[in-house]
Amino acid sequence: MADYTTVDPRDFTEEELLSGARGESKQLKPQLAVTLLHAKLGPSAEQPLTRLAADEAVDPRARQSAVLELAPYAGARDVLTTLTGSSDDLVATAAARALAERS
């Protein structure tokens, strides 16, 4: 039998998820917080995800997750293009992949 936990984005506030995505929570890993934030906010997640993806103080793995979650948003093309030039390889590669998935 597998040992797992079910996590519902409705159990967290937007601020709790943003805090987790920035690595400020012991309860949530940053990548999980990003995924839950996207699930909770749906179409209105674009701006918070954009801010996370562009914030160099955020853990690169969380930024990578935010970049990949931005892929389907039409308004994210400019930020994704900019992030392909990121000095962080995880972020730059994720941005290139997200742009390629849009094509």
Image (cartoon, rainbow, N blue to C red):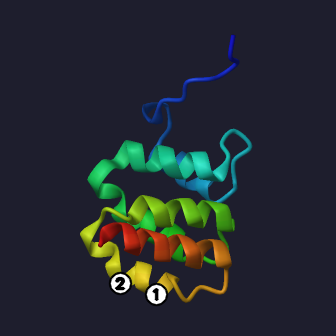
In the displayed image of the protein, which residue is found farthest to the right?
A: 26
State the residue at coordinates (31%, 49%).
42
- Where is mark 1, residue-wise? 82
The local crowd at label 1, few if under 14, some if 14 to 19, many if 20 or more residues have their Cα within 10 Å, is few
* Residue 10 picture quarter: top left
The kind of secondary structure element at disc 1 is helix
Q: Is 102 placed above or below 36 here?
A: below
Left or right side of 73 for 79: right
The disc labelled 1 sits on which kind of residue?
Thr
The kind of secondary structure element at disc 2 is helix
State the residue at coordinates (69%, 56%).
23
Left or right side of 1 for 41: left
The local crowd at label 2, few if under 14, some if 14 to 19, many if 20 or more residues have their Cα within 10 Å, is few
User: How far across and how far down the image is residue 84, in percent?
Assistant: 51, 84
Left or right side of 14 for 3: right
User: How far across and how far down the image is residue 59, in percent?
Assistant: 69, 65
Tell how many labels. 2
The disc labelled 2 sits on which kind of residue?
Asp
State the residue at coordinates (47%, 42%).
13
User: How far across and how far down the image is residue 49, in percent?
Assistant: 44, 63
Give the camera-side residue of 12 and 37: 37
**Which quadrant of the rendered structure holds the N terminus?**
top right
- What distance separates the C-alpha of mark 1 from that of mark 2? 6 Å
Give the camera-side residue of 63 and 47: 63
- Where is mark 2, residue-wise? 78
Do the residues under discs 1 and 2 have CB atoms within 8 angstroms? yes
User: How far across and how far down the image is residue 99, in percent?
Assistant: 39, 74
State the residue at coordinates (60%, 55%).
21
